[in-house]
Amino acid sequence: MLDQTDSLLLQALQTNAQLTAQELGDILNLSASQAGRRRQRLEEEGYITGFRASLDPVKLGLSVQAFIQVSMVTHSPDAARSFQALIRARPEVVSAWTLTGEADYLLRVYCGDLSELNRLVHEVFLPHEAVARVQSQIVMHQTKPDAPLPI
């Protein structure tokens, strides 16, 4: 169970994962060692699953962001494993979800340009034997950046 101090610590780390124990202690009104122990406990309990740098996709040459909905022909376990292995192996796919409703999967992808997105859809996803339909939506502008989780 999280207390208010744990919640504040997690909020602070979502904003800046590079905070030192001393900086966390200052934010939480704790000593550096107390803040460090709390962070370590939250890592061990699985509340904190990792630390990442947030990168600018455009500066990296990834100017096209899209969401791709994939509907499957079959829902057999083998087809699902095969498709999931395919999307895990593709670096363009930065996140993927299984869904209820019309589409079975929602993929978030980054590509260098529209022709790369076209190749990904037509040469990678559509040829997969379990894929029935692919529908993509190209992001024109991200009006709200990926935000921290509400704690």
Image (cartoon, grey):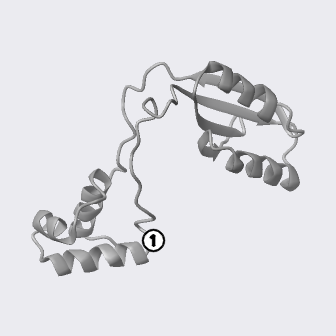
Give whichever of 50, 55 is nearer the camera.
Answer: 55
Give whichever of 82, 54 is nearer the camera.
Answer: 54
On screen, residue 13 versus residue 30, left or right, reads: right
Q: How many numbered discs sit on the rendered protein? A: 1
On screen, residue 135 versus residue 32, left or right, reads: right
Q: List the residue tagged with mark 1.
A: 46
Residue at x 44%, y 63% (from the top left corner): 50
The residue type indicated by label 1 comes to: Gly
- Is there any visible trace of residue 138 in the rendered image? yes
Give whichever of 98, 128 is nearer the camera.
Answer: 128
Give whichever of 91, 29 is nearer the camera.
Answer: 91
Residue at disc 1, secondary structure: loop
Q: Quadrant of the C terminus?
A: bottom left
**Rendering coords of residue 102 (x, y %):** 72, 32
Residue at x 37%, y 25% (from the top left corner): 143
Quadrant of residue 52 within the rendered picture:
bottom left
Q: Quadrant of the N terminus?
A: bottom left
On screen, residue 119 versus residue 146, left or right, reads: right
Q: Is residue 101 above or below residue 151?
A: above
Q: Is residue 31 above or below residue 88?
A: below
Q: Residues within 10 Å of mark 1 (few under 14, many from 20)?
A: few
- Is there any visible trace of residue 102 in the rendered image? no
Residue at x 90%, y 39% (from the top left corner): 129
**Rendering coords of residue 58 (x, y %):** 45, 29
**Rendering coords of residue 104 (x, y %):** 72, 39
**Rendering coords of residue 118 (x, y %):** 71, 22
